[in-house]
Image (cartoon, coloured by chain):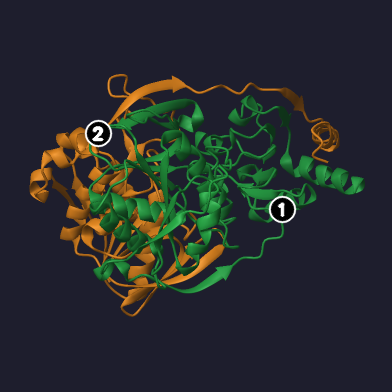
Chain colours: A orange, B green
């Protein structure tokens, strides 16, 4: 059972984001970290491989400047190796361009199951994984809240508006996992040390046989025309609770009464 | 490019009516074009013709045969085939579970990019789509520079639905081509979860809990208050990530957008991720023990205090009124 997990390295989401004044796209300079949303896929992959009694987890990622710091985190959790696509021509890639790159890289990984988050924390377009599946001619199950392997198929509980659906899908396929699907492990010291020497295969667009006009700005076929500050909300009354909550509760009740909610 | 035809991907809710988001998209589509076609799937969807027509759709492109499969591949393939014999200029799709699958599959099939998380669209020859970034602090406008059809995934609650009083849409059947392996994911069983109150994204009152609650068991306080206020419980990403409540409770960028009359944020600091999903609430009440929490800067009533003291007192106060 070999699992490939799509991971994205993003600017630290706890730091304020910035837009490039020239291109109006998110600034992705400096140290990148693994997107928290991807930790669930990595953990799920490790657990499924363990349950199958053999196989490995391969990370597949695309990043500027051959950045690997985020990948090392996932390697330290237990992934065996990584494929990283970096190329100057990738700057400005949209979700579909990214999907073309990941699909080509995943084809080399040859996994039974591909896992991805439902969306990234920074760009949050939320279409890339299923675009990858379509480009690879694979079935997909999005929004998984539970996954198990049953012989040559995967059984997924898929989130819906009304509850969830039990979905079955033959392997190979792609599954996107929601946050909380499993509890990601923390890398231990041994994991962190061994991650340093795990293989990260670095590829360019040419290695994947992709043309530069399919990705980056030319492939995105879109332009940002304006960036403006949104209308701001102002803070209203701030009340400091005296300690037992009673007075604050009364204030909330009075506020709700004023609005005729109660 | 003048916009002549707009397609709207229509979804039905559990009771077989168009979802609110579908009606929102149809209403917006009427501003963009006079010729609106809806796309809907499943045997029963032919019954949507009247409701979709009354919101402006003149034609219903009906993908009846999706079988037991997840709809994404079948609907996208049927749309792509139909586009080959007459393409719309724009396709508006809801940013929902299935809407996202259809948009992603269609995008890859047609080799057209998608603009996602759209919260507004301007009319004219080259429609501009607005997206909220950095927790809604900035609005970015973007437009396509390539060929039509132009694909947009629109967030729920972006527009107010209004009836057009139009007649029932004329139904045109779309067939599903051979999907090969892509159509192999099938729904074995559906589970409807019991819900006592209103839906999170339709509730007039939303009571959300975050990490400040301290532990998973304390989410019960949120559920109690939501019930007392006839509202819906919601959650920050932090406690969904921690596994305290399911993903379906999540309010924010990667969860639901809510625009209730009252949003009560309990123990939520107000990460940009969360704010973008609830900034549109009419009134915001926030309880947080940190007086520097960003949520307090947008709250109409801010309480600096311990949620585990304030919430039990609030429950008591509300119970004593009823």
Residue B225 to residue B14: above or below: above
Q: Residue at x 17, y 54 (%)?
A: A104
Q: Quadrant of the C terminus of chain A?
A: top right
Q: Which residue is mark 1?
A: B223
Q: How many marks?
A: 2
Label 2: element kind? loop
Mark 1 or 2: in front is 2
Label 1: element kind? helix
Pinpoint the chain carrying mark 1.
B
Residue B255 to residue B291: above or below: below
In this rendering, would A164 be left or right of B320?
left
Residue B254 rendering spot, x and y as whole percentages: 48, 45
Are callouts 1 and 2 both on one chain? Answer: no
In this rendering, would A120 be left or right of B266?
left
- Residue A87 seen anywhere in this rendered image of the structure: yes
Among the 4 quarters of the image, the one containing residue A10: top left
Residue A165 rendering spot, x and y as whole percentages: 49, 68
Q: Which residue is mark 2?
A: A92
């Amino acid at each position: 059972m070999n699992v490939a997990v799509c991971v994205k390295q993003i600017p630290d989401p706890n730091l304020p984001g910035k837009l490039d004044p020239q291109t109006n796209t998110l600034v992705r300079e400096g140290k990148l970290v693994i997107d928290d949303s991807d930790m669930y896929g990595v953990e799920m992959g490790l657990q499924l491989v363990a349950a199958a009694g053999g196989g490995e987890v391969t990370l597949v990622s695309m990043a500027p400047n051959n950045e690997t710091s985020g990948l090392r985190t996932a390697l330290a959790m237990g992934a065996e190796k990584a494929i990283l696509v970096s190329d100057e021509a990738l700057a400005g890639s949209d979700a579909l361009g990214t999907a073309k790159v990941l699909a080509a890289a995943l084809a080399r990984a040859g996994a039974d199951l591909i896992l991805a988050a439902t969306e990234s924390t920074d760009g949050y377009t939320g279409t890339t994984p299923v675009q990858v599946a379509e480009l690879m001619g694979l079935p997909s199950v999005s929004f998984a809240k539970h996954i198990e392997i049953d012989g040559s198929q995967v059984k997924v509980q898929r989130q819906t508006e009304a509850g969830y659906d039990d979905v079955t899908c033959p392997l190979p396929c792609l599954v996107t996992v929601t946050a909380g699907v499993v509890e990601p492990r923390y890398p231990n010291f041994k994991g962190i040390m061994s991650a340093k020497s795990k293989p990260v295969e670095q590829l360019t667009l040419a290695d994947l046989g992709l043309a530069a006009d399919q990705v980056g700005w030319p492939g995105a076929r879109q332009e940002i025309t304006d960036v403006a500050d949104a209308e701001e909300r102002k803070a209203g009354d701030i009340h400091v609770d005296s300690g037992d909550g009673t007075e604050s509760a009364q204030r909330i009740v009075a506020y709700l009464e004023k609005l005729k909610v109660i | 490019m003048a916009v002549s035809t707009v397609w709207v991907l229509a979804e039905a809710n559990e009771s077989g009516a168009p979802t609110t988001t579908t009606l929102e998209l149809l209403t917006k589509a009427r501003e963009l074009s006079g010729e609106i076609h809806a796309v809907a799937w499943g045997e029963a969807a032919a019954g949507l013709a009247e409701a979709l027509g009354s919101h402006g759709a003149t034609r219903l492109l009906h993908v009846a045969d999706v079988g037991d499969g997840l709809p994404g591949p079948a609907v996208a393939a049927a749309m792509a085939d139909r586009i080959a014999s007459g393409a719309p200029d724009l396709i508006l799709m809801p940013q929902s579970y299935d809407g996202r699958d259809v948009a992603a599959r269609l995008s890859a099939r047609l080799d057209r990019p998608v603009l996602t998380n759209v919260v507004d669209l301007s009319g004219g020859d080259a429609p501009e789509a607005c997206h909220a970034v950095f927790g809604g602090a900035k609005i970015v406008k973007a437009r396509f520079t390539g060929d039509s059809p132009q694909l947009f995934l629109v967030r729920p609650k972006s527009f107010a639905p209004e009836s057009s009083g139009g007649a029932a849409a004329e139904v045109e059947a779309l067939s599903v081509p051979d999907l090969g392996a892509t159509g192999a994911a099938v729904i074995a069983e559906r589970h409807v979860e019991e819900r006592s109150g209103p839906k999170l994204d339709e509730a007039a009152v939303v009571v959300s809990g975050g990490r400040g609650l301290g532990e998973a068991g304390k989410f019960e306080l949120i559920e109690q208050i939501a019930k007392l206020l006839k509202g819906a419980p919601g959650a920050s990403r932090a406690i969904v990530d921690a596994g305290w409540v399911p993903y379906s409770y999540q309010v924010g960028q990667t969860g639901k957008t809510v625009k209730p009359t009252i949003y009560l944020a309990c123990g939520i600091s107000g990460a940009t991720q969360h704010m973008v999903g609830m900034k549109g609430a009419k009134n915001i009440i926030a309880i947080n023990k940190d007086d520097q929490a960003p949520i307090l800067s947008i709250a109409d009533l801010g309480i600096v205090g311990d949620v585990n003291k304030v919430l039990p007192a609030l429950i008591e106060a509300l119970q004593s009124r009823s």
